[in-house]
Image: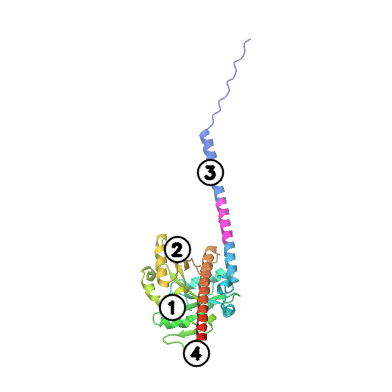
Amino acid sequence: MGSSPSTPPKKQIVNKYHDVTQDKVREAKERQVQKQERQKKEKEERRKRLKQDRNKKRQELRNYRFGNIHGQHYFAGLDIRDMQEGGLRIGLFGPAGSGKSSFINTCERAMKQGLRRGNADIQTAYGEGTIVLQEYLDDIDNDFCLVDTRGFFQHNIDELTALADIVHGRIRPGQEVKFGRSADKEEIDEYFPNWLHAIIIVLSATDPRLQDGHTHRNNLKIVRDFMRRRVVTVITHHDRIHESQEEDILAKASAATGSALDHIFFVANYHIDKKETDYNTEMGALEVMKSALHVAERYVKMHKLQELADREDEAIV
């Protein structure tokens, strides 16, 4: 009896291309998900660090006491009791459309936790030749405030008289002053803490008067000559110019305002309707204010040294 022939094994056909393709697609999707999760985590970490940095800088300015920037040793031998009592006043100047009011609102939001909109009125206009001063951040228990100078950049006023009256405390916050005449001598405020100790000039990067290199330079000559080294410059609308224009804009802004390059800042302002917190925007505003305090403290020292020299000269005579 013969043996029956064995049944040959069945051949299994494997679609290796189909399997490999599916594996690669699945792996690619997994990598994409992992990448997105990693990017999200990194973004959250960056935002967390920015928030911490913002909080630190905010607290530093909210707790500011006169002399904190340079240190008390910087004023050794000088009588600064009046400044310790009165604090620094930082003026804000800027032509219409520069973004000055938006910058003030951004400073307020940077300094005040939970604030969703600043108090500076972007639309308010006053009569011809009228200047109105308004203080901001004066409700914080520290040693500085911002002073808005609405109406200064008008061509029908005596700018030198106006500037001198503002800087030397002859115009008080909330007071509307018509120019075309000098302030009465009895209006002159000799109390040094009521002066402006530094100013921030706000200019728009897209303003043709800045870009042409001469209009703002000519118009700001009086301010530049009067304030000298007391000027910090803010350039708004940074997002509307190309990166290749930045160096040219910085140079023209420095020539117009007299600010050193390390006291000129490109900033992004909060839009009036933006409620979400932007830590980069707030950090920029805080850096500007700290720079202004640096300039202001330096000016106070120069002024106090001059006062001391004058008293010594009088004693000799």
Label 3, secondary structure: give it.
Answer: helix
The spot of residue 218 in percent (x, y) is: 37, 75
114 on left or right of 157: right
Q: Nearer the viewer, mark 4 or mark 3?
A: 4
Which residue is label 1 attached to?
Answer: 226
Residue at 40% x, 60% y: name it.
244
Answer whether residue 45 is magenta in the image: yes
The spot of residue 38 in percent (x, y) is: 56, 51
The spot of residue 23 in percent (x, y) is: 55, 39
- Label pair 4/2, CB-CB below 8 angstroms: no
Label 2, secondary structure: give it.
Answer: helix
60 on left or right of 251: right
Tell me if mark 3 has few (under 14), some (14-19) or many (20+) residues whose alpha carbon lies within 10 angstroms of its own. Answer: few
Among the two numbered marks 2 and 1 on one chain, the one whose residue lies closer to the N terminus: 1
Which residue is label 4 attached to?
Answer: 186
Answer whether residue 281 is magenta in the image: no
Check the image and name the residue furthest to the right.
1
